[in-house]
Image: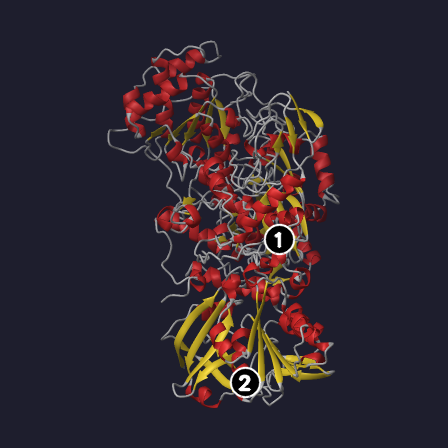
Amino acid sequence: MKIIIDGRSFEVSGEETVLEAAKAHGIDIPALCHHPRLAPWAACRLCVVEIKGRNGYPPSCNTYPEEGMEVVTDSEALRSQRRRTLELILSEHPNACLVCTEKERCDEHKASIRKSAEVAGCVFCPSNRRCELQKLVDRLGVDSVPYDSVYRGLPVRRSDPFFIQDYNLCILCGRCVRVCHEVRGAAAISFVFRGSQAVVGTQFDRSLIAAGCQFCGACVDVCPTGSLAERLARHEEPAEAKSRAVCPYCGVGCGLEVSVLQGRIQSAAPADGGINRGQACVRGRFTLRDVVHSPARVLKPMIKKDGKLAEVSWDEALDFAARGLKARAGKTGLTASSQLFCEDLFVLDRFGREALGCGGATPSAGVSILDELSAGGMTGRVLGSLKSLPEAGTIVVFDEPVSLTHPVAWVSAFEAVRKGAKLILAGAASGPMSRHASLCVGLKPGGLPHLIAAVSKALLEKGCAGAASVPGFEAFKKSLESACVSRLAEAAGAAEADVRGLADALAGGGPIVFLFGGNLVGLPRPLQGVALLWNLAVQTGATLLPLAEESDTAGSWLIRSRAKSPAPSLSALSESLGKGDLKALYLAGPMTLPEKHGLEFLVVQDSFLNAACAWADAVLPAAAFAEAEGHFVNLEGSVRKSERAVPPAGESKPDWWIASELAKRMGAPGFSYENAGQIKAQLDKEGVLALPAPGVSGAGVPPPVGTGSGLPAEGKKAFVPASLPAPCVSGDSPEHAEAPVSGEQGSDHYRSLSLCHASPDLALLRRSRRTGEARPAAKTAETVTAGGRQ
Amino acid sequence: MNKILRRERLVPNIHVLEVHAPEVAAKCVPGQFVMVMPDEKGERIPLTIGDWDREKGAVTVAFMAVGTTTHKLALMSAGDELPVFVGPLGKPSEIGKFGTVLVAGGCFGIAAIHPIARALKEAGNTVVTLIDVKANYLLYWEDKLRKVSDSFFVSARDHKFGTTHYVQGKIKELLDGGLKADRAVAIGCTYLMYSACEATRAAGIKTTVALNPIMVDGTGMCGACRCAVGGKTKFACVDGPDFDGHAVDWTELFSRRKSYLDDEMKSLCHWERSLLAPGVSGASVALPLSTGGAQLAPGA
């Protein structure tokens, strides 16, 4: 339809509001409560417009266009109305600095006042010069507030990790509350009290940590004032530079905007658009600074001298390491972290094959889902993407606490739930997941394969056709002939009714997506579980979305798969080490090495000092991800470029540089790389990252956004042989791997550094979730503003 | 150890501390300060004496919670003890019969000017007090100051006071309005003192300011509080804290006050984190760190 905005005629869809339509055509209407990812709210009344034929000034953020509508977004009457509204908003917001004639000189001379306990003006405020409200005051030309200033006198809340909440600055735009409810599904915060007492708070006025907040930081990112301020950055000047990095922790590969001040990371915020669309999680949002600038960083190359590690020059360290490794070529193992860039992994893999003679780089995290899919011959375009996840009609999560391990994937899943999708949880869940689930199926540890088989059998019993023409169906059917739904359900620890309920939901149609991750691959027979799940997906037409644990799991798989002979697996490497076949080990990935196991020579290439350094003959300092540029391949096969944000710490060097320097010194040809760009060019030339990963729908290119069903489910697919899980004696639990004792999540590390070690705030969060304790009852700085403990 | 008799938050950021310190209370005079440590491991900070009660043996200081040490002080309460409360230090303010004296204060300086205004009043001067606050909710000790003032003004950026002037604008307005001041005293943040001096300079009114550089020992030993006055290096602790504001090198003072800003921020964050998660230390380089990697289990 056509509408006229400020005298110009525009074609609009009618699905976007007048405010969004105007913005799309370059007309920016001032607003404070509007946010593109949130439902219209119309609270701030700043986006008012004039519409011909309508009385008053309707807010453009919740007015939808009508054919021929004539809108005026700027007039003296509107400007006056907006100024009056803003003055009212400011009457309860510390506004002295906004109207002070001295503000510029004051900013310059009062830098230290930002450390104050309470904010009594912009010069005190963590958001000074980056505040939306401040910018709007300038834009609307408000230079006085005709009301007596009111300070609400609420205690500044400092007893939560990561960020501080000062609701004396809050203008009640509701963005934080809405993003928590509408986007994250967490509902940790809400409005409490009414009228002039209304304030953002938690149930029973508990701390955020006790209220179940996951500290994703979404509220901090949407706050237009300084009410919510990141603890580590809040006193500092605005950033001097920003660069786009990719989060190095989990397989989602969120884009992050890294703020840099004086050559150091100040903070990181989720980038708009892209895969994560303005969302991040507690790890990516709040731990980067602590990790990259950790005191545990290795800053200089070290080699063992007189039984102790001593700092030496790069030349000396490289010569020493090259000699030691060359002398043991063919009897050396090499491991690499799947949190390294593709460029690093490619050079390390080549270094392993061509210089060390070890057959390539072994992923230090062990087998990945992609390895299992590939090993089981499960190929075809059956894997989904994060982009198409919100279009799903049914989402089944197989024993994975997605909102904890891959919080941004949960955001996409929750978007589908908001649109009416059924969420079914089998086994582990976390935070907000169970609240939004339509069915939660219980699960014993290790019971997942039984559950999957039970669901397949229940579906066959229902006589669900549709998959009968798929190759391998008969064999699949035969394999389940002897199975009994109730016995399998019992072995899985699930109620039979729930199993049948899950089968009914899967038979109900609608695009189905299966989410699964480390808990399935971590089973004693991962291949069996993955094959059973694959078959269930083929049977129901579901799309699989495996949640890779590390940022470059897919990249690592692609790089290793380019060679005919794959690199040894972690278990094979472990076995060789145990047998004493290995004389040297090169660790470019985190490894717990309790003893030296007869190794003659150990080289550690890492960004952080770690336990293995205790045995190391050489320690080579590697640059952290934000200190180098490179690419990750995320869980859906997208190649994601990460920019360098800060210079490498100390004398650390990119991983590819270290490996190629060593390779050169060991006489291997073809390692004269000068920058990461040359390596990427080679990867592109050889088509390494463009190879389709098993099941991945065209890695390297954006996955197709569904055809018909909304999800890609075309191409080659077939049932694969899958054995039934061993029957269990009634009452017994199926065999399962021991749960990790640390309580940390799979991606709670970067290389060898535990994120909880780097960030005491994260340690507090994880500890409180693990033990159920809200937080230690300690005297906190909160009482500085509450008048102190009495 | 000196026992705290009262600790109260007067207005946002400003706290008052009444401490039992009979030796200090017996000797202190207007313009002097004490050095305070909230705990035995922290830094020493100077706080200007705002009032005293010689009979009770009590000394009152006001401070702004703006760094780690003042945040720590703001957490203390009656009955707690201060390991260090040393004073009175610094030279007394010059008190004489000058005629009309303009006394300007802001922030923590509102308390600091109180004994000076009182002494000036007792000495027979006409005391014109000007308080600068950003907003009405930051004004404190109005009653105490009115008692020792012949006239009382407020400069603020608040509709309640009908003015948007900063301190120098109000001084100019008063002078333009016919105020004949023979002397001026200004105490508050560096910027307030600087601005007040700028306002009185043209009229040639001698203006005393109490400088607030970073100070460590307060007795002239360390030299951290050096500042340039009239082209000569002075130590604020023993040569001051009062100086002729028109002779102070303000550029240098502003710069020196920011010398440790980065470290001050780090310290505050570190301290807040330590309160947040007692027992959860920050990263340390001590081996071994926990790792996220799989364990190599040879021969398994």
- In the rendered image, residue A259, in percent from the top left (x then y), is placed at 63, 50
Q: Is residue A689 above or below residue A756?
A: above
Numbered disc 1: secondary structure: strand
Type of amino acid at the residue the image marks with label 2: Lys
Of residues B193 and A759, which is closer to you in this image? B193
- In the rendered image, residue B85, in percent from the top left (x then y), is placed at 46, 81
Image quarter of residue A439: top left
Q: Nearer the viewer, mark 2 or mark 1?
A: 2
Q: Is residue B93 above or below residue A157?
A: below
Residue tagged 1: A265
Which residue lies at the image location 69% right of the left edge and 31% below the top edge?
A6
Of residues A23 and A142, which is closer to you in this image? A142
Numbered disc 2: secondary structure: helix
Q: Which mark is residue A118?
A: none
In the rendered view of the protein, which quadrant contains the C terminus of chain B? Answer: top left
Q: Is residue B252 left or right of residue B217?
A: right
Bin the neighbour count of mark 2 within 10 Å (Cα to Cα): few under 14, some 14-19, many 20 and up: many
- In the rendered image, residue A246, in percent from the top left (x then y), is placed at 61, 41
Which residue lies at the image location 54% right of the left edge and 55% below the top edge?
A147
Q: Which mark is residue B121?
A: 2
Q: Residue furthest front?
A: B178
Of residues B262 and B22, which is closer to you in this image? B22
